[in-house]
Amino acid sequence: MEFTHQRTVQIVAGLLILAAITQATYTGFYVAREYGMEVEVPRQFLWGTEGLIFTLLAAFAGSALVEAKRHTLGFSAIAMSAALNVVQVGVGLTMFGPFREAANSVEAFAPAASAVVAFSFMVYNSAKILLGLAAIVFGMVKLSTGGKVLGGATAAVGAIALVSNTMSMAVGRDVLGEIPLAGGSGVLATLLLAVCLLGVAKQG
C-alpha cells in the first residue's frame, strides 16, 4: 500500500478520532467513580492503547509534515503533541503506581509522588495546547474553503483549549476547578480537528 500524502492525512485524522474516544472513555469511567458508581477503570488497557495511538500518530503526522506543501504549522503541532502524549502516558503507566505506594509507606515520599503527577499534567497540558493550535490552523483552513460552521467551531474550540490549558499550566490545576475545561476542550478540539483534516485530505 502506497502512503500518499492524502492517505497519510486520513490516517492522522483517524488516529486523532481514536485518541479522542479513548480519552472520553477514560473520563467517563472517572466521572462514574466520582459519583459513587462501582466502576473498575482499566487504566493499563486504556493508557496502553493511547500509547500505541500516540506513537503511530507521531510517525504519521511527522510524515504528513515532511510531505506537506501547506499547513506545516498544523502538522508540526500534531506530531509534537503526539510525542508529548507518549511521554505523559508513559509516566502514568510506569511511575504513578510505584510512587503512590512509596508515599503510602513512607510519608517523606509524598512530595516526590506529587511532583510526578504534576509533571505528568504539565506534559498533558502542553500536548493539549499544541492540539488547540492545530485546531486553530485547520479550522482557519476550513473557514477559508467555505466550511464556516465547522471551521469556526474548530478554531474557536481550539482557542479555548489553548488558553485554558495554558492557564492550567500556570496555576497547576484546571482553571475552573471541578469543571474540566482544559481537558474537555482539548478532547473536543481533537475531534473537530480530525473532521477538518478529512476535508483537507480530500483537497489533496
Image (cartoon, rainbow, N blue to C red):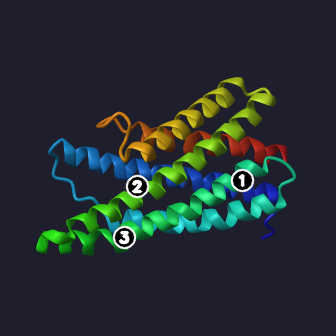
Residue that numbered label 2 is attached to: 121
33, above or below 15, in the image: above
Residue that numbered label 1 is attached to: 75
70, above or below 140, in the image: below
Residue that numbered label 3 is attached to: 93
Q: In which quarter of the image is residue 153?
A: top right
Q: Residues within 10 Å of mark 1 (few under 14, many from 20)?
A: many
Disc 2 element: helix
Between the residue at mark 2 and the residue at mark 1, the CA separation in whole angstroms equals: 23 Å
Q: Residues within 10 Å of mark 2 (few under 14, many from 20)?
A: many
Where is residue 145 shown, x and y percent of the image? 81, 31
Tell me the mark number nearer the camera, choosing from 2 and 1: 2
Q: Which of marks 2 and 1 is nearer the N terminus?
A: 1
Inspect the image, locate mark 1, and give the three-letter code of the amino acid beneath it: Phe
Q: Which of marks 3 and 1 is nearer the N terminus?
A: 1
Where is residue 146 shown, x and y percent of the image? 78, 26
Tell which residue pokes out farthest to the right in this image.
69
Q: From the viewer's perspective, tell me whether residue 79 is left or right of residue 26.
A: right
